[in-house]
Image: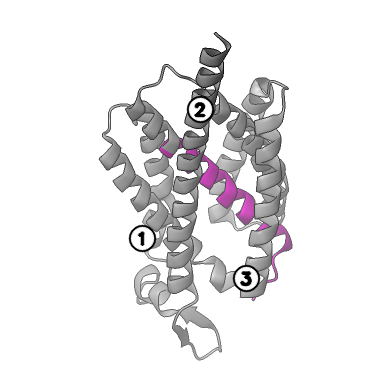
Amino acid sequence: MNSILDNNTAYSKEISREFFRSVYSYMFAALAISGVIAYLTGAGEQITFENGKQLPVFFVKYFLTAEGAISPLFYVVAFAPVGLGLLIQMAYRRLSLGLLMGLFILYSVLMGLSLSTIFIVYTEASIASTFFVAAGAFAAMAILGYTTSTDLTKFGSLLYMAFIGIFIAGIVNFFMHSETMSYVISAVGVFVFTGLTAYYMQQLKGISQDETLSGLDRNKLSLIGGLQLYILFVNLFLSLLRLFGSRD
């Protein structure tokens, strides 16, 4: 009897480990895709204007009009990931795994194009250092969320409502360009995104240990988990960059 229990426990742990391997594989793949695209389009060949300002060739060609104003394509790239992310998370049960992966890659590409603008505003050194700070904070909260025995459900619900609030405020400030509001949103965002990282890790731990899930559902949920962690990490990184990044 003990041998059977031990075998079942070992099997459950292996399933859980495999689930998290998939989750982090999706997350790191998305970060790699977005990072490469952001760097190539944001830090590549530059155009120098008469006033001495330099902008990436890609940005000038696709995100500016002939008059120098922001083009509609820029707004599409900036806001399309929001709808695409919601589609992936809300309709994953009805979509095939292949289609979900395609949408996931498209999301990563669009995010990379959107993130390319940080190279216009901040120095590469501050972007790199902030990335590692965000990675450290993210890892610490992920470990906390996985290991804690405290139920974070209520805490997560409150943070999710705060996330919606700063998301709406962020959209408003996208057009208002208020430095003060940007600072407040970023400061609150650091707290919200680190807290949500712990909450989602606890949720993913529960999913990983659910033996009733089919193999297909488990694969889909690992993709959703990777997407959620990717979104949290990127938002934490951007919040820290707005607070502490050195402007170019």
Residue bearing the label numbered 3: 122
Relative to 41, residue 105 above or below: above
Mark 2 surroundings within 10 Å by alpha-carbon count, few (fewer than 14), some (14 through 19), many (20 or more): many
Helix, strand or loop at mark 3: loop
Say which residue appears at 48% left-offset and 70% top-offset.
Answer: 39
Amino acid bearing label 3: Tyr
Residue bearing the label numbered 2: 208
Front of the two marks 3 and 1: 3
CA–CA distance in space, label 2 to label 3? 39 Å
Amino acid bearing label 1: Pro
CA–CA distance in space, label 3 to label 1? 24 Å
Residue bearing the label numbered 1: 72
The range drawn in magenta is: 223-248
Asked if the residue at tag 3 contacts the one at tag 2, i.e. Cβ–Cβ closer than 8 Å, the answer is: no
Query: Mark 1 vs mark 2: which is more N-terminal?
Result: 1
Front of the two marks 1 and 2: 2
CA–CA distance in space, label 1 to label 2? 42 Å
